[in-house]
Image (cartoon, rainbow, N blue to C red):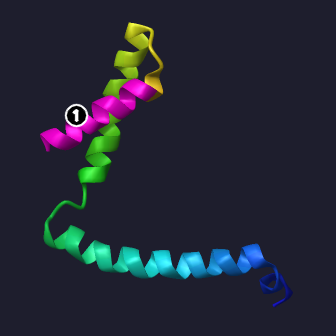
Amino acid sequence: MEILSYGFMQRAVITGIVVSILTGIISVFVVMRRVAFVGSGISHAAFGGVAIGFLAGVNPVITAMIYSIFVAFGI
């Protein structure tokens, strides 16, 4: 276990444990509210924002983020 003697690896392991516990707790509420596929829907809607960005000649990342925010509020 020499790899755990490095500080950044210790922090990475601790962070991974904390994130896994928190996502386990949050996932219960996501499933109970039946919004499990909202993230997938928003990510697919971001393709529309990318297309708008390309057609308008604007940075597609910016338009995808803005479009995704509008879609999230619409849901």
| Prevailing SS of the magenta stretch | helix
Q: How many marks?
A: 1
- Point out residue 26 in the picture as x, y percentages from the top left corner: 30, 73
Relative placement, left or right, of 41 versus 56 is: left
Relative placement, left or right, of 24 versus 58 is: left
The residue type indicated by label 1 comes to Phe
Count neighbours of disc 1 (C-alpha within 10 A) and say few if under 14, some if 14 to 19, many if 20 or more. few
Relative placement, left or right, of 30 versus 4 is: left
Question: Disc 1 on helix, strand or loop?
Answer: helix
Residue 36 position (above or below residue 46)? below
Residue 45 position (above or below residue 58)? below
For image coordinates 78% across by 85% down, the residue present is 4
Quarter placement of the N terminus:
bottom right
For image coordinates 34% across by 17% down, the residue present is 52
Q: Residue furthest right?
A: 2
Relative placement, left or right, of 72 versus 61 is: left
Question: Is-magenta flag for residue 64?
Answer: yes
Residue 37 position (above or below residue 7)? above
* Residue identifier under label 1: 70
Residue 3 position (above or below residue 74)? below
For image coordinates 81% across by 79% down, the residue present is 6
Question: Is-magenta flag for residue 34?
Answer: no
For image coordinates 30% across by 36% down, the residue present is 68
Q: Which residues are magenta?
A: 62-75
Quarter placement of the C terminus:
top left
- Point out residue 32 in the picture as x, y percentages from the top left corner: 15, 73
- Point out residue 49 in the picture as x, y percentages from the top left corner: 34, 26
- Point out residue 48 in the picture as x, y percentages from the top left corner: 31, 26
Comparing 10 with 46, the one in front is 10
Q: Residue furthest bottom?
A: 1
Comparing 23 with 41, the one in front is 23
